[in-house]
Amino acid sequence: ELKEEAEELEEKVEEAEELKEEAEKLEEKAEELEEKAEELEEKVEELEEKAEELEEKVEELEEDAEELEEEAEELKEEAEEIAEEKAEELEEKVEELEEDAEELEEKAEDLKEEAEEIAEEKKSDNSNTD
């Protein structure tokens, strides 16, 4: 009977040793997992920092874009005003040139008439001297 109990105890000791080994292995795995968890936590923190930086950059870019839009709108308005002014100036110049052209036409007509009169006078002078 004692022998059987001794054998049973021996088996239990062996089982306990096996369990102890398994527990040690599990402990090692737990430590490894803990290390990995810490590494992942660090990576998460880094990514969060990068995300914050990117958010800030996005905000800056959005602000820049708004400023550029405003500047573009102002430039567009200025360009339209300048174009209108230039168009008005050109219209005035065209009108002036048209008036000048009319005056020149009238002068040319007057000169033509004068030339014709002079030519007729010369003809009559020539015919009178004959």
Image: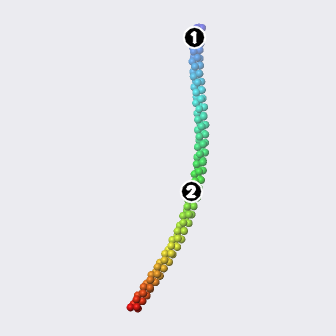
Measuring from the top left, give residue 96's x and y in whole percent.
Answer: 52, 73
Secondary structure of the residue carrying tag 2 is: helix
Measuring from the top left, give residue 8's x and y in whole percent.
Answer: 58, 12
* Callout 1 amino acid: Glu
Q: Give the spatial CA distance, label 1 vs label 2.
A: 94 Å
**Above or below, comparing residue 4 to residue 52 in the picture:** above
Lateral position of residue 63 relative to residue 124, left or right = right
**Above or below, comparing residue 61 to residue 84 in the picture:** above
Label number found at residue 87: none
**Above or below, comparing residue 14 to residue 103 in the picture:** above
Lateral position of residue 108 relative to residue 1, left or right = left
Q: Residues within 10 Å of mark 1 (few under 14, many from 20)?
A: few
Q: For mark 2, what is the residue?
A: 72
Return the residue nearer the eye: 112 or 88. Answer: 112
Q: Residue at x 47, y 82 (%)?
A: 110
Residue at the extreme left of the image, as rendered: 130
Mark 1 vs mark 2, foreground winner is 2
Secondary structure of the residue carrying tag 1 is: helix
Q: Residue at x 59, y 21 (%)?
A: 24
Measuring from the top left, give residue 69's x and y in whole percent.
Answer: 57, 54
Residue at the extreme front of the image, as rendered: 129
The N terminus: image quadrant: top right
Q: For mark 1, what is the residue?
A: 7
* Callout 2 amino acid: Ala
**Which numbered disc flags the more N-terminal residue, 1 or 2?**
1
**Above or below, comparing residue 50 to residue 130 in the picture:** above
Measuring from the top left, give residue 15's x and y in whole percent.
Answer: 57, 16
The C terminus: image quadrant: bottom left
